[in-house]
Amino acid sequence: MSNSKFVLDKIAKLFEQGIVNYRDFSNEILNIIKSKRDEIVFKMKLTSKEETDIVIKRLNNLEKKILKIEKKIKKIK
């Protein structure tokens, strides 16, 4: 309930300030929503897509190294 009230308060402020252009209004709405999304992501401590991609690449490299080491161990036995 408080999230919807926050958004409605922001929209009311926009009307009070006299933003009548649709493009400006839609940009402000998008900015409000993006800021709330960022706030939620920060609270949840989620990672960005770039960070996730980096972790996946590192994990793949480590898996390859493990496979190489396992092959070497099998050859030695």
Image: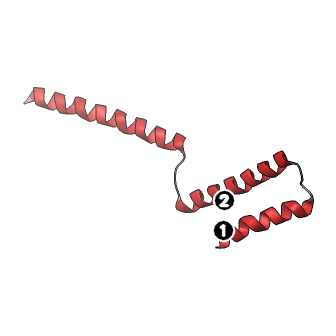
First in residue order: circle 1 vs circle 2? 1
**Front-most of residues 39 and 4:** 4
Q: Which mark is residue 26?
A: none
- The residue pinned by badge 1 equals 3
Label 1–label 2 contact, CB within 8 A: yes
User: In this image, 48 relative to 12: left or right?
Assistant: left
Farthest residue to the left: give it: 77
1 vs 2, front mark = 1
Identify which residue is drawn at 64% across, 73% down.
Answer: 1
In this rendering, the answer to whether 65 lies above or below 52 is above
Farthest residue to the right: give it: 18
Q: Where on the picture, by quarter, is residue 71?
A: top left
**Front-most of residues 26 and 57:** 26
- Horizontal and vertical percent for residue 22? 84, 48
Identify which residue is drawn at 30% across, 36% down.
Answer: 63
Three-letter amino acid code of the residue under disc 1: Asn
In this rendering, the answer to whether 37 lies above or below 58 is below
Label 1: element kind: helix
Label 2: element kind: helix
In this rendering, the answer to whether 62 lies above or below 23 is above
- Horizontal and vertical percent for residue 66? 26, 35
Q: Where on the picture, by quarter, is residue 61?
A: top left
- Horizontal and vertical percent for residue 48? 54, 46
- Horizontal and vertical percent for residue 24? 84, 48
Q: Which mark is residue 36?
A: 2
Three-letter amino acid code of the residue under disc 2: Lys
User: In this image, 30 relative to 73: left or right?
Assistant: right
Identify which residue is drawn at 83% across, 65% down.
Answer: 12
Q: How many marks?
A: 2
